Image (spheres, helix red, strand yellow):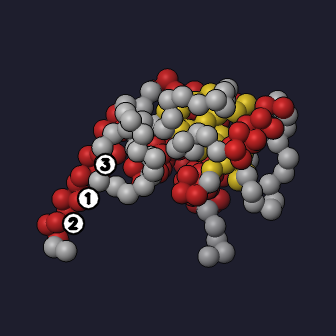
Amino acid sequence: MTVLMMKKLLEAVLQEDSLVLSQVSSGETDDLVNKINEAKRIFVYGEGRSGLMGKAFAMRLMHCGYEVYVIGETITPSIGKDDFFVAISASGTSNSLANHISKAKEKRAFTFLVTASKENQLSPDGKLLVPAATKNRRQGEPQTIQPLGSQFDQSVHLLLDAIIIALLEENDHNADLQKRHANLE
């Protein structure tokens, strides 16, 4: 593969992700930022690559000084009232996701879903739509050269990193990031 060919592929991916992100609702992103700031504790959930995006988001939230846990880790405590449950799922339809949202609501936590699905049966309290292609390639999803759900995963990663930047600017946590960064590497 030539350097020119790789450059064209990268430009195509960046253009695709930029188009997706330009369609994200600022009201929905503001809702997510506000809920993070209001939360007593934050619980992040995702499966597969969405789960990896969730772990990256949780790490940055921890660096910012938030009390945050990843669902499925052995040290994650039980969720409760005034906690914030945020899930990342392109399809927004998995049984385990439905169970987690139901349980979080039962415990009076606020539930939020980051998804590519305009319609789902889960009824979270809040939602952030990322209108990207998923591995399912449903009708109405954008065209992409990227495999499976890569367009969703990359768009979510960039969007959640931008939300971290907004939180840092809003709360002036930036000076403390290095103090919370891992030092046993």
- Check disc 3 and report the residue beneath it: 144
- Tell me how far mark 1 sits from mark 3, CA to CA: 12 Å
**Position of residue 148 measured from the top left corner of the image (x, y, whole percent):** 42, 55
| Amino acid bearing label 1 | Leu
Asked whether the residues under the numbered discs 2 and 1 touch, taking CB atoms below 8 Å apart as contact, a structural biologist would say yes
What residue is at 38 percent from the left and 57 percent from the top? Answer: 147
Mark 3 crowd level (few <14, some 14–19, many ≥20, 10 Å Cα): some
| Left or right of residue 167, residue 103 in this image | right
| Amino acid bearing label 2 | Met
In the depicted view, which residue is nearer to us: 42 or 136?
136
- Tell me how far mark 2 sits from mark 1, CA to CA: 6 Å
Q: Where is residue 19, by image quadrant? A: top left
- Check disc 1 and report the residue beneath it: 10
Asked whether the residues under the numbered discs 1 and 3 touch, taking CB atoms below 8 Å apart as contact, a structural biologist would say no
How many tags in the picture?
3
| Amino acid bearing label 3 | Thr
What residue is at 59 percent from the left and 31 percent from the top? Answer: 120
Helix or strand or loop: what does disc 3 sit on?
A: loop
Q: Earlier in the sequence, mark 2 or mark 3?
A: 2
What residue is at 42 percent from the left and 36 percent from the top? Answer: 131
**Position of residue 164 measured from the top left corner of the image (x, y, whole percent):** 53, 44
| Left or right of residue 161, residue 58 in this image | right
